[in-house]
Image: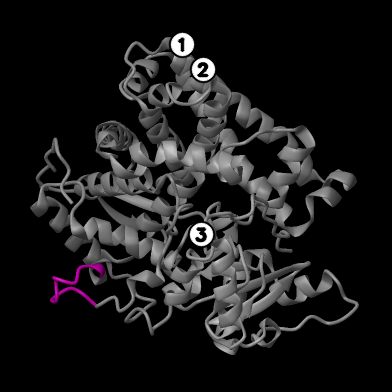
Amino acid sequence: MLQRLRGTGSRFRCTGVQQQRAGVAGESRGAKPFAEMPGPRRIPLLGMLNDVMQLGKPAELHLRISKYHEQYGDLVRLQIGTQNAVFVRDPSLMRKTFQLEGAYPRHPLPESWTYFNKKHDYQRGLFFMDGKEWLQSRQIFNKPMLKDFHWMEEPIRGTCEATVGHMQQTCDSAAAFEGIEAFLYQWSVEVVLSVMLGSAFTECQQSAEFRRLVQQFSAVVYDIFRCSSELMNIPPAIADRLNVQPWQQFEKVVPETIRLATAIIEFGIANAQTRDGLLDLMMQKLDKPLMMRIFIDFIIAAGDTTAFATVWALYLLASNANLQQSVRQDVLDSNTLECGAVKGVVRETLRLYPIAPFIGRFVEHESVFGEYALPKDTLVLLSLYSAGRDERFFAEPEAFNPYRWQRTNAAKSSTARTPSASLPFAIGARSCIGQKIAQLQMHYLLSMILTKFELTLAEADQQDAIKPILKMITVPSAPVKLCLKPCSAQPELQAVAQMQD
């Protein structure tokens, strides 16, 4: 069953808030009552059984909500436990959601994590922060990670080059690439570490102890999300009381992951000779305990999200040979690691397979939303999977077409009518802090792979057999089996000192 959703945080206070509320109240008088918003109704006396019946299997929640949108429209009202929730598919209302989030945006958190943190008195990073503490920390990170981010290009590029070099040495062109998910997990963790440590990451990698810590961490963090997804079927307090196996594993793997992440960061601090990474910059602005909390969460989150987004991108390229060749040629012709075609591959991948198929925000005050009045603290969830596959917003929505994002290329482009229907990193004050890292590392790695390898699916029936399922994030229903054959007589992509937009 879907985990119960929760949100905490400081209440929105700013100059003129009373006038704002008065204006909303005036507008609300002309809006339809929240209870009239369409959606499946709960049956009295069934309690939590309503959630089971209405939401279905956690792994197929995106499909169930898509059916509700087809049945009820762009706004679907549900009650999840005691929480009022609205799923929204309309792009204009999706964008409006971020206008209603207040000064300290609150989002739903996985209950297994919040329960664990409270039980063990764990203080966590930005994802779990709220109120002024979150805002102050976030503002410090905004400039180096989202505004003046070009300094990250060199360490990310170097890590991607090393990863592709390893692939060239170890890949068997006649066999499937074994363990692509775990391999990309480690790559994604190493990218984040290269940003954190800067030039010192290369220095640290000379140590067998450091490499062992990173390998152990990459393996253990993979288990965190597996355990979390298994706990979606039962409230964690009950899982803890009954001492079920997924909870036992979760309580073991989280402390081990945090221990390894702490050891990695401490190793970098103690052994780095060069200090030009994000870690050194933040040490000048944050106290060490807070800095450690934030960076630990960074490297825990990095592996799962970007690794699986890249798996989906490789799967789509391997499934579309002609488009793969076209994108490869565009990369070679552009002589950059971030040509429009590769950016289109990433955007198209995240449209079809958004890593977070639902992005949620709690409405800070009573508000008008479309035709309806939303009560304060309503949870609004953006149905990114549904909106991204809606033919009103994208021509041929089920087709993989990275050129739809290039409006200037009429020959190849199928116009994206409403690009804002795909918001994989969210927008607003609480948009994904790691989006630039994720985009750069995917652009670089995909460009390098395309110039070195031809991608095919090891099993022909995979193209139809693999489906997106939810395990906290959107993952393939079966392991993706790729064959990587070295490109024949392809010119090498030249390294560029300055990436171009």
Can residue 440 be seen here? The reply is yes
Q: Secondary structure at mark 3?
A: strand
Queried whether the magenta region covers residue 410, the answer comes back as yes
Query: Please, what is the three-letter code of the amino acid marked with disc 3?
Result: Pro
Give the label on residue 266, or none: 2
| Residue range highlighted in magenta | 405-414
Q: Tell me, yes or no, whether the highlighted magenta stretch contains residue 412.
A: yes
Please say which color scheme the image uses.
one colour
Tell me what residue is drawn at x 34 percent, y 81 percent: 396
Which of disc 3 and disc 1 is earlier in sequence?
A: 1
Q: CA distance from mark 2 to mark 1?
A: 6 Å
Look at label 1 and name its amino acid: Ala
Query: Is residue 255 left or right of 26 when viewed as pictured?
Result: right
Q: Which residue is mark 3?
A: 476
Q: Which residue occupies the foreground of this view, 300 or 149?
A: 149
Q: Position of residue 409 (x, y in %)?
A: 14, 71
Would you name the residue on which mark 1 appears?
270
